Image (spheres, rainbow, N blue to C red):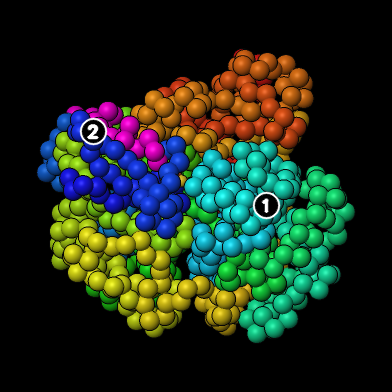
């Protein structure tokens, strides 16, 4: 190993730079990269413990067929043959890929190209559907493109930061530290909008513990208040915004109704509205509390409406900032890893289909969007999809109604799982498992929340017979007969093509453009510095400050959105709302962070956080056990009584699986409903009942 290798943390969407070196005993030392603009040398607990997660514990080291060790030749032959046969017999829509925000952009690119360009179906979706797809849909409605206009620096130049549905302190800790430091330095005001009192409230000047799901009402009320108090940026709106009158008309609401509907005091609502009104540099940061809802897209637009109305967008310290959960959710969006996107931020329009098919020289390109995650697994359950390849994700734990997902995979004719770990809940259903490279072994790029592309670099040998995902997919593609279209010998080859596609017949038509990449040589790829896009002729520091949007009219859209209740309301039988989310020191289903003893000491077992009155009412004792039941499943958890909860709400972490704790899989409880525009599941609102166990 060179003195130290510069790479990127594989966990959250902050995308911190990491330096890896060896100590005198041959161990691995992980530090924050002082030159990376996401973290400037800092790491959170998860990043700092990355060294604990290396090694071969729970690594999948060989391919397996029917749980028996097989060669790569046998396994890839079988995967290619079964996908080919299935397509020939039942058509392209009978197969699907379910992929992950953990993949590198190069892995994602090759998977997307194979299924959309050559197999001929858009049945590829990603676990990022669960993370930020409502923000994608909201961006596209407002901007005509999936563009995040703001950057991390705005946290440090804003005067008011509104955190909506975001426990930044635990879920994006380095951004929280940056905001905390900015608050100390310049007195930034912070408003937290979240039904729970989370660790993030430590720096809140105001916490609005709104009723779960009432965000649209709150932001519609803000828009009305801004309108009544003359906050419209007349020249910006006149020149660059449309949909104003219909939106103001449709969303008008008074403060009393807002306070009642959101279950917060009039004084608190007024304090928030007045702060927003009087502060030009206002940044709205939103995350899963907004996105994971049956009204997630509308929530995003209700926030963006307020920024378009005041012209507070695309300028220093002000605008909407969607914070992604996963390390490469953004990269997946860029290459088209979502079922409703094509590639390089192109859509399923006739022009884009033609453009991408010519670039790929693909005769059989998919012509319409494929099935989004929930629909995909339902189609598997119904027998319409007969072969599925699941890459680097664990849907038997993370998808809603996880019991039905398990039934679907049990019934499916052919299930392939490629992953770096052995023994996941999902792997139990696989006909073929393929060992993928892990962090530290793979080379490629990821894009963080602020559109910054960074390198992940290998610093150790591949474990066992593991291979990079792009290589596994390439091998299968060749065996399916697509040799010419999949000539890749390295992740550099894939990146090169990805850059070329972003620029292909673009001329400023699309926001995503890498055409100005400084050095596209192999050596240049090795040396990539963290770089924000766009990086080309059409590059600009910020999007939308100049009023140029990617809609047909070129204007930003205000969208008239109306508050709606969650699909499943609480009832007498299921009187509590189950909220789910991350804890500070674990990541996803703990397949990696669970290997670190120091991370596991933070929270040692799954729990249910309950308000004291609810506990009293249900006869629950702090530290006792509770049986949580929804219409879809049950879980047994340790009770944690907490004043941080609203009375009717309970919270459960999302990390535990059958692999590490029986009967604590949150996905088994969560209602299988989703946002009609984005397809993102309502993971923050499931009616449940409680009883002592
Ligand atoms: Fe940074 Fe997120 Fe990794 Fe923590 S988990 S070090 S905040 S990228």
Residue where numbered disc 1 is placed:
190
- Residue range (magenta): 47-68
The question of residue 62 being in magenta is answered with yes
Q: Position of residue 225 (x, y in %)?
A: 81, 64
The CA span between labels 1 and 2 is 41 Å
The question of residue 204 being in magenta is answered with no
Mark 2 element type:
loop
Nearer to the camera, 562 or 464: 464
Label 2: how many residues lie within 10 Å, few (<14), some (14-19) or many (20+)?
few
Residue at image point 69% right, 42% down: 195
Can residue 685 be seen at all in this image of the molecule? no
Tell me: 388 left or right of 27.
right
Can residue 11 be seen at all in this image of the molecule? yes
Where 641 sits versus 371, above or below? above
Tell me: 269 left or right of 379.
right
Residue at image point 17% right, 41% down: 461
Residue situated furthest front in the rendering: 185
Nearer to the camera, 278 or 216: 278
Viewport quadrant of the N terminus: top left
Disc 1 residue: CB within 8 Å of ligand 1:
no
Mark 1 element type:
strand
Q: Position of residue 326 (x, y in %)?
A: 44, 49
Residue at image point 58% right, 37% down: 580
Residue where numbered disc 2 is placed:
27
Nearer to the camera, 502 or 479: 502
């Amino acid at each position: 190993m060179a003195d130290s290798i510069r790479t990127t943390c594989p966990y959250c969407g902050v995308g911190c730079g990491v330096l890896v070196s060896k100590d005198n005993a041959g161990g691995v030392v992980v530090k924050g990269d002082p030159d990376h603009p996401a973290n400037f040398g800092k790491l959170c607990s998860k990043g700092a413990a990355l060294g604990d997660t290396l090694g071969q514990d729970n690594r999948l080291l060989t391919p397996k067929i029917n749980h028996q060790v097989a060669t790569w030749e046998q396994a890839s032959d079988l995967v290619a043959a079964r996908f080919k046969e299935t397509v020939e017999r039942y058509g392209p829509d009978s197969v699907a890929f379910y992929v992950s925000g953990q993949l590198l952009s190069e892995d994602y690119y090759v998977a997307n190209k194979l299924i959309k360009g050559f197999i001929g179906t858009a049945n590829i979706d990603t676990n990022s559907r669960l993370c930020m797809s409502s923000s994608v849909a909201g961006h596209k409605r407002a901007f005509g493109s999936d563009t995040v206009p703001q950057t991390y620096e705005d946290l440090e130049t804003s005067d008011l930061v509104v955190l909506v549905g975001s426990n930044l302190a635990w879920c994006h800790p380095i951004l929280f530290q940056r905001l905390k430091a900015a608050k100390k330095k310049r007195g930034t005001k912070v408003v937290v909008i979240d039904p729970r009192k989370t660790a993030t409230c430590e720096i809140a000047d105001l916490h609005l513990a709104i009723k779960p799901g009432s965000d649209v009402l709150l932001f519609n009320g803000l828009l009305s208040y801004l309108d009544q108090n003359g906050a419209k940026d007349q020249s910006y709106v006149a020149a660059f915004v449309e949909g104003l009158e219909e939106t103001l008309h449709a969303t008008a609401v008074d403060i009393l109704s807002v306070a009642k509907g959101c279950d917060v005091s009039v004084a608190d609502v007024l304090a928030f509205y007045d702060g927003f009104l009087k502060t030009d540099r206002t940044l709205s940061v939103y995350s899963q509390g907004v996105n994971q809802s049956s009204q997630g897209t509308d929530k995003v637009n209700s926030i963006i409406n307020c920024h378009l109305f005041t012209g507070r967008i695309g300028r220093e310290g002000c605008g909407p900032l969607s914070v992604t959960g996963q390390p490469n959710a953004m990269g997946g969006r860029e290459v088209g890893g979502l079922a409703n996107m094509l590639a390089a931020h192109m859509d399923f329009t006739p022009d884009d289909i033609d453009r991408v098919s010519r670039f790929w020289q693909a005769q059989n390109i998919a012509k319409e969007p494929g099935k989004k995650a929930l629909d995909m697994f339902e189609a598997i359950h119904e027998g319409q999809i007969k072969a599925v390849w699941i890459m680097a994700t664990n849907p038997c734990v993370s998808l809603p109604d996880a019991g039905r997902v398990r039934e679907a995979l049990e019934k499916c004719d052919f299930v392939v799982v490629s992953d770096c770990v052995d023994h996941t809940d999902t792997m139990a259903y696989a006909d073929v498992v393929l060992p993928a490279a892990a962090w530290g072994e793979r080379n490629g790029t990821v894009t963080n929340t602020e559109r910054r592309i960074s390198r992940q670099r290998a610093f150790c040998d591949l474990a066992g017979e593991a291979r990079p995902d792009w290589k596994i997919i390439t091998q299968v593609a060749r065996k399916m007969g697509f040799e010419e279209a999949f000539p890749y010998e390295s992740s550099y080859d894939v990146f090169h093509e990805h850059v070329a596609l972003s620029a292909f017949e673009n001329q400023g038509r699309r926001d995503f453009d890498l055409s100005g990449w400084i050095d596209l040589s192999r050596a240049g790829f090795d040396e990539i510095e963290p770089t924000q896009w766009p990086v080309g002729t059409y590059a600009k520091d910020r999007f939308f400050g100049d009023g140029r949007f990617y809609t047909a009219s070129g204007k930003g859209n205000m969208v008239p959105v109306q508050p709606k209740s969650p699909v499943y309301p609480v009832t007498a039988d299921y009187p509590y709302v189950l909220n789910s989310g991350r804890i500070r020191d674990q990541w996803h289903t703990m397949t990696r962070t669970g290997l670190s003893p120091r991370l596991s000491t933070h929270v040692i077992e799954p729990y249910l956080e309950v308000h004291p009155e609810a506990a009293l009412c249900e006869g629950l004792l702090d530290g006792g056990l509770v049986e949580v039941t929804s219409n879809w499943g049950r879980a047994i958890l340790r009770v944690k009584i907490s004043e941080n909860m609203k009375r009717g709400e309970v919270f459960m972490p999302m990390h535990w699986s059958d692999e590490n704790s029986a009967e604590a899989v949150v996905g088994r409880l969560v209602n299988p409903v989703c946002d009609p525009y984005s397809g993102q599941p309502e993971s923050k609102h499931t009616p449940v009942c409680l009883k002592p166990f």
